[in-house]
Image: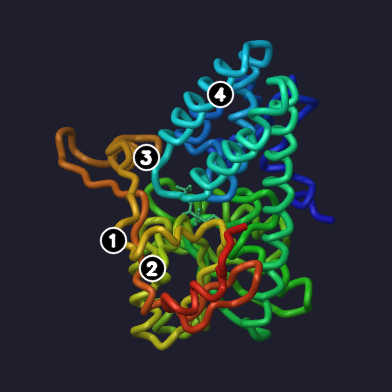
Amino acid sequence: MTAVEKLETICWLGDAQGRLRLIDQTRLPETLEYRDCEDVESVWEAIKQLRVRGAPAIGIAAAYGVCLGLRTVKDADRTRFFERLREVTEYLAGSRPTAVNLFWALDRMGRRAETLRETAAPPEILAALLDEARAIHEEDRRMCHAIGRHGAALLGDQTGVLTHCNAGGLATAEYGTALSVFFTAQDEGKQLHVYVDETRPLLQGARLTAWELQQRGIDATLICDSMAAQVMRERRVQAVMTGADRIAANGDTANKIGTYSLAVLAAAHGIPFFVAAPTNTFDPQLPSGDAIPIEQRDPREITHGLGRQTAPDGIDVYNPAFDVTPAEYITAIITERGVIRPVSRETVASMLGEHRV
Ligand code: MRU
C-alpha cells in the first residue's frame, strides 16, 4: 500500500457529536494538511474555497455538513428541526452551482429525514442522517473502484493518456474516477504514461493530479494546457480521460474549463475521448448541456493566481470554472454500472434505467 492509499480525503470522526476532517486541497502539493469542520459554515467555506473539491467529494462533504448544521437543533421540537434542515440544505446548495452531486446528496439527505418525520425524534433522525452520509461516502468508494474496472478494459498496454483537472482520490471518497481507471490498469500490469494538463487557473492538474500519480508510482508528465494539441500531434497519447461535474440526459458533459477544447482536439486527431463518472453525476432532468449552470469565479484567480499579480489592474476578466463538452465528442462514458457507448439520449437513459443511485 502506497502513502496515498492511506490518505482519507474526507473522514468523519466520532458519533453524531463528532466532526468532519478534510484534506485542505488548497495547501497541496506543498503540505498535506487536514482541516476540521465543526459547523456547517466551515463546510460551506471549504467547498466554496475548494479546500474540498471534485464533484463526488463535494457531495459527500455536504452530506456530513447537513449533520453538523442540525446539531444545534437536535433537542428542539420536530417543526424547528425540519425548518433548520431546510435552511441548512439551502445554505449548502448555495456553495457551488455546477457539480450535481452536491444537490443529489442534499436531496438524498432530505428524503431520508422525511421518511422518519412522523416516527422518530430529532436525535434519532440526526443519527440516521449521519448513517446516510456515511452510506453516501462508502457507496462512492465502491463506485470509484467499479469505474476503474470498467475503464481499464478500454485501455491497452503501453498507452499514453491525457487527463485534465483532478478526478482522483482527492475528488472522491477514494481512488477517483478518471484516475481510478489508471490505477486499476496499472494494478492489472498495464504500462501507462499519463500526460497531466496543469489546468489553469487553479492548477488542479499540476497541484493535485501530478501529486497523486507520483504517490502511486504512475509515469506522468506535466504539461501546460496549451500544449495538448502538440502532444496529440506527436502521437504521445492514444486516449483522453476526464471526470465530470454534471452530465445532461443527452450525454453533454460539464467538467473543468478546458475539457471541451481537449475533446475537440481529440476528435481532430482521431483520439478517443472518455469521461469517467458515477451515475449520481447525471442530471436526467436537464435535456442538454445548455441548461447546466456554469460557475463563474473570482477574477483574481486569473489576475493574481500564481502568488503575484500577473495582469494589469482594471483588466476585464472572464472566469467560467467549467465548460460543456457536447455528447458528439465523447467516445464513451464510464460509469460504475458499465460503459455508455455510443453516447446518446437513448444509451444514457438505458444505463440510468428507472432509478438513480
Ligand atoms: O473546480 P473543481 O476542482 O471542483 O473541478 C473538479 C472537476 O472538474 C473534476 O474533473 C470533476 O469534478 C470530476 S471529479 C471526480
Circles 1 and 2: CB atoms closer than 8 Å: yes
Give SS at disc 3: loop
Task: Please tell me in which quadrant of the rendered image residue 62 appears.
Answer: top right
Question: For the N terminus, which image quadrant?
Answer: bottom right
* Residue under the image location 77 percent in, 52 percent down: 5
Direction from residue 157 to residue 209 in the image, left or right: left
What distance separates the C-alpha of mark 1 from that of mark 2? 8 Å
For label 2, the SS is loop
Residue at the right extreme of this rendering: 1
Instruction: Measure the alpha-carbon separation of dots 1 and 4.
Output: 34 Å
Can the viewer see residue 197?
yes
Dividing the image into 4 quarters, which one contains the C terminus? bottom right
Residue designated by label 4: 82
| Position of 225 relative to 123 (above/below) | below
Foreground tag (2 vs 3): 2
Depicted 24 relative to depicted 124: above or below:
below
Residue 90: image quadrant is top left
Residue 74's spot in the image, x, y percent?
A: 67, 16
Question: Residue at the top extreme?
Answer: 76
Q: CA distance from mark 3 to mark 4?
A: 41 Å
The residue carrying mark 2 is 252
**For the residues bearing labels 2 and 4, Cβ distance under 8 angstroms:** no
